[in-house]
Amino acid sequence: MGKRKLKTQQTEATNSKSKKSKKEVVLEPIVQSDAPVERQTKWTNKQRTLIFSSRGISYRTRHLMLDLRTLMPHSKAEPKMDRKDKLFIINEVCEMKNCNKCIYFEGKKKQDVYLWVSNVPKGPSAKFLVENIHTMSELKLTGNCLKGSRPLLSFDKNFDSEPHWQLLKELFIQTFGTPNHHPKSQPFTDHIFTFSIEDNRVWFRNYQILEEEDGSLAEIGPRFVLNPIRIFAGSFGGATLYQNPHYISPNDYRRALKRQKADKYTLKVEAKEAAKMRKPEVSYALDPTDLVFNTVTQEDFQKNK
């Protein structure tokens, strides 16, 4: 019995030593400059964002969606969803894809683009109208960054002014921010996502950090403007937490433009009718005795016949 106890104690001691050796990282006294840096293997912030769209979006919206997928290494893709399906199905799709955030592009009339940003499955969620889309493939955007690098998130000070802007700020941080030590991310920060508020809209820009000393930047793209419509308590629905009073739908805007053109046409017609009313039937008074001395020729007589 004594021999067995000694053997068990020795095995437990060796197991404890092996566990300690696995947990502890022993640094070498001499490290080469080209040697890879040991990274933390534990991944705590497991944020995953599902980025996909509905059918019927334009080519520019599709390029914007692909740009966001390349810039966000913690994103996942999904085929296009049918427009007849209800938005609550997206929660089930996110659950199957093991995602807790979602960016959904909804196209209507092949010209209007709506963006949903949602926290799955409990909410909140926000719906935006996307305006002024410019992708990374445009020539005027000359910046560049490493694929998979973690961005810095810069927010305007106006985000702290009102409660709905504070809620959108937290939603953007959790959706667009790449988690630390993500398996697909790179341990570099060489670009910045900027969110600024102007004209009751959120302006998104992506810049490359050229030099850290003087803070010079170069725009990478994409760039777009988000016009908030509503903020819901649930994911893709629920009670309305905020409704934008300054929002004008694209249909109302196009209807107003057509009405302006129609007003121009009606003004032209009214001006013509007014000119006809002002024009007199007789320009000046004629003397009937002037026709007495006119001689009637043979040709005039034949014409009268």
Image: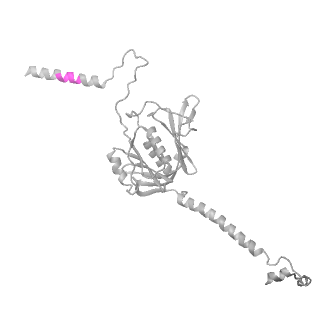
Percent across and percent down for residue 10 are 17, 20
Q: Quadrant of residue 214?
A: top right
The range drawn in magenta is: 11-16
Quadrant of the snapshot with the N terminus: top left
Total marks placed: 0
- In the rendered image, the residue lying farthest to the right is 293
Vertical relation: 145 (above or below) 227: above
Percent across and percent down for residue 220 are 53, 37
Percent across and percent down for residue 277 are 75, 75
Please give the name of the residue rendered at 68% of the width and 69% of the height, measured from the top-left corner.
Answer: 269
Percent across and percent down for residue 177 are 44, 39
Please give the name of the residue rendered at 53% of the width and 60% of the height, measured from the top-left corner.
Answer: 251
The kind of secondary structure the magenta stretch mainly shows is helix
Vertical relation: 118 (above or below) 47: below
- In the rendered image, the residue lying farthest to the top is 30
Q: Residue 13 in magenta?
A: yes
Please give the name of the residue rendered at 52% of the width and 42% of the height, measured from the top-left corner.
Answer: 135
Left/right placement of residue 265 relative to residue 147 reads: right
Q: Residue 99 in magenta?
A: no
Q: Which is more toward the observer, 72 or 25?
A: 72
Q: Quadrant of residue 35?
A: top left
Left/right placement of residue 295 relative to residue 10 reads: right
Q: Which is more toward the observer, 281 or 221?
A: 281
Quadrant of the snapshot with the C terminus: bottom right
- In the rendered image, the residue lying farthest to the left is 1
Q: Which is more toward the observer, 37 or 286?
A: 286
Give the color scheme: rainbow, by chain, secondary structure or one colour: one colour
